[in-house]
Every structure is written in structure tokens, then in C-alpha cells.
Image (cartoon, helix red, strand yellow):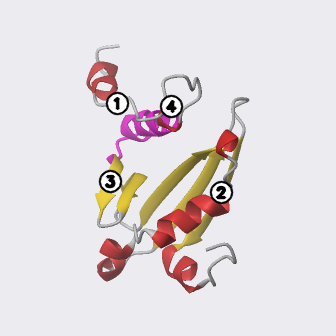
Amino acid sequence: MGHLAPILASLSGGNEPKESSLRESHFRNAMYVVFTLVGEQIRYEVPSARGRSDSELQLPESIYIFELKLKSSGQSARDALWQIRERGYGDKYLGEGKPIVCVGAVFDSTAGIEWEQMRYEALKELPLPVNQ
């Protein structure tokens, strides 16, 4: 447990309502622990000019931006991708010459996950949904 103590001390409690037993922060924190244990520096609640991405991972060959949602919110993996697009989470990396991979994921209470990934440049090219 000695090696895990600094990792666990870095976890955020999240900002979801206390009455909610299932929280985005649970899944974000699990990602943080896994990536940290394999030696990658994942950042969470990364601020940008128009909001905060749930997690971002910079690797030598690519950059990943994760947006997580709970199924109970009624949102989809595509909705999570739209949030990345709308808030421009990948804009700050456009000049780095690396692929920017966006991952939208939806979790539920049965440990189910639905996810979709798309390159940021392709996501920016898609027409906005009708309800936008």
C-alpha cells in the first residue's frame, strides 16, 4: 500500500451531488490510478478557456482527451464528444503536430461502458447536431 498512498492522496472528490452514489469522479479516479500505475501522467479536470475536460493524457506520439458521462444523465458517448468540440478542449494542442484523440465514455451502475473515439480534427469537421 505504500506505493499507492501518494496516488490515492492525489484523487479528487468530484463535484457531483452527495445523494448520488454513482459519480463521474469514481470513473475518472479509476482511470487516474490505472494510468499512474503504468507510469503515465494523466491530468484530470484540466481547465481551458471554455470549461474543464475530465482527463487528458499526453503521450510522445499522441494526445488523448477524455470526457466522461453517467448513463443516468441521459447523455451518450457522442454527447461527450460534442462537449469536447463545443468547449474547444483540443484547440490548445493543434500546433503540436500530434494526433489528438477524443474519447467520449458513458458509464452505468452495472459497470457497463459505452464509448466512442474520434480524432479532434475530424470531430471539428462534423456538422453540429440539430439540437445545438
What is the x, y in percent for residue 87?
Answer: 43, 68
Q: Are marks 3 and 4 in contact (CB under 8 Å)?
A: no
Q: Are marks 2 and 4 in contact (CB under 8 Å)?
A: no
Density class for disc 4 (Cα within 10 Å; few <14, some 14-19, many ≥20) is some
Residue 59 shows in this picture: no
What is the x, y in percent for residue 24?
Answer: 52, 38
Q: Nearer the viewer, residue 87 or 57?
A: 87
Query: Which quadrant: the C terminus?
Result: bottom right
Instruction: Report the disc number at residue 46.
Output: 3
Report the residue marked by disc 2.
77
**Residue at the (70%, 48%) spot, across then down:** 74
**Residue at the (35%, 79%) spot, across then down:** 94
Query: Which quadrant: the N terminus?
Result: top left
Residue type (three-letter) at the residue carrying disc 4: His
Report the residue marked by disc 1.
11
Residue range corresponding to the magenta coloring: 27-42
Precedes in sequence: disc 3 or disc 4 = 4
Report the residue marked by disc 4.
26
